[in-house]
Image: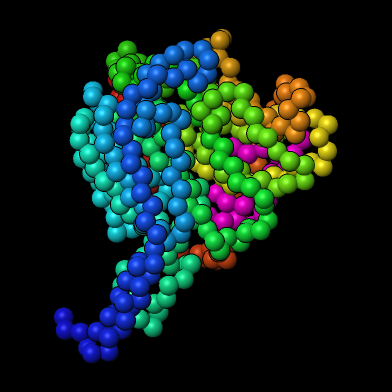
Amino acid sequence: MALSLSNFLYRTAALLLLLGFLAQATTVTYDFNVTWVVTNPDGAFQRPTIGINGQWPLPHITATVGDRVVVNVNNQLGNQSTSLHFHGLYMNGTTHMDGAVGVSQCSIPPGASFTYEFMVSYLNDFIPFEKFSIDSSQIDQPGTYWYHSHDSGQYPDGLRGALVVNDPESPYKGQYDEEVVLTLSDWYHDQMSPLLKKFISVANPTGAEPVPDGALMNDTQNLTFPVEPGKTYMFRMINMGAFAGQYLWFEGHTMRIVEVDGIYTEPAEADMIYLTTAQRYSVLVTMRNDTDSNFAIVGSMDQDLFDTIPPTLNPNVTGWLVYDKTKDLPKPALLDDLDPFDDFSLIPTDGEELYDVVDYSFNLDVKMDNLGDGAN
């Protein structure tokens, strides 16, 4: 279809504006050699773990709104293929960089390499120039995310890490003194390959999921965070687990929720939150004005998800806000019940109104069942 001269000029101008923006974008490059390492993060069992550049825990990917991210991946595992998925990013226009094996890309075989390249933003399809603008509503996707393998249930073997997109125009800019990434995860002593074979099996006709052997906080246990009285910290929290949702709370402190899964929210106070697997929260926590005590940070796996609970399982993982390193690290108090914040009450800051008129309604009946061979 022929374009009128005015439409041609509009689109050309829009393209020039876009190219000008891209020319100003910073390129953030990471070189990841995916390798096996040996770890023992819970102090109970030494096992092969998938690391990057010979190290584990994995490095964070950090960028700023509008940046171009380049991740060069070389698979040196030797016995497994792999991929990287960047969880929560829209990948509009770059779905072939989304890392979902069998959906948007082939796996990276042993000895091979693949380069992921994408913008940490989203750009709408071409729109009329009079409606085109380069503003935060069109191009940014700030927030807390994570990256992980998306090949054969592999990431619980260790191939997962934090991904943070910083926002110079954050509505909470200036309201905190320091950022801290805090990850939670379940942890298995067995590798995923044999666990999946046992899971999807006629010997497991009910499809009972493997129960974790423990829980981790920042890929360890007994974590300590040195803090300063009166300061406010933004904790970017990520549940990187395979299966278990987790309750989380800071003893003696109140959280202010300001972001969930990359969406800014109006501040909401919470004493405890619940993070499902893959979910992310950002919370502001203001420290007390004295240094009389240190305080526990507690993550507790949701045991209602487990078909059986081994008698040796400790569902909790504890860290501490350390005001004074010469003082004791107190054991967390026992709670009679777990009562997390109701996230349905959160209000996004974008001000977008709810739809109030339904033109078409579709009902889908979904049944959770299994095929008698472990497959649900």
As drawn, 366 above or below 308? below
Q: Which residues are magenta?
A: 252-274
Front position in the image: 366 or 262: 262
Quadrant the N terminus occupies: bottom left
Question: Magenta span has 242?
Answer: no
Q: Position of residue 23 (x, y in %)?
A: 35, 67
Q: Residue at x 43, y 28 (%)?
A: 56
Horizontal side, residue 1 vs residue 155: left or right: left
Horizontal side, residue 10 vs residue 57: left or right: left
Residue reaching furthest to the bottom:
5
Horizontal side, residue 299 vs residue 26: left or right: right
Q: Residue at x 27, y 26 (%)?
A: 77
Quadrant the C terminus occupies: top left
Q: Residue at x 39, y 77 (%)?
A: 132
As drawn, 55 above or below 66? above
Q: Position of residue 27 (x, y in %)?
A: 37, 56
Front position in the image: 74 or 97: 74
Residue reaching furthest to the left:
1
As drawn, 79 above or below 344? above
Q: Residue at x 45, y 52 (%)?
A: 63
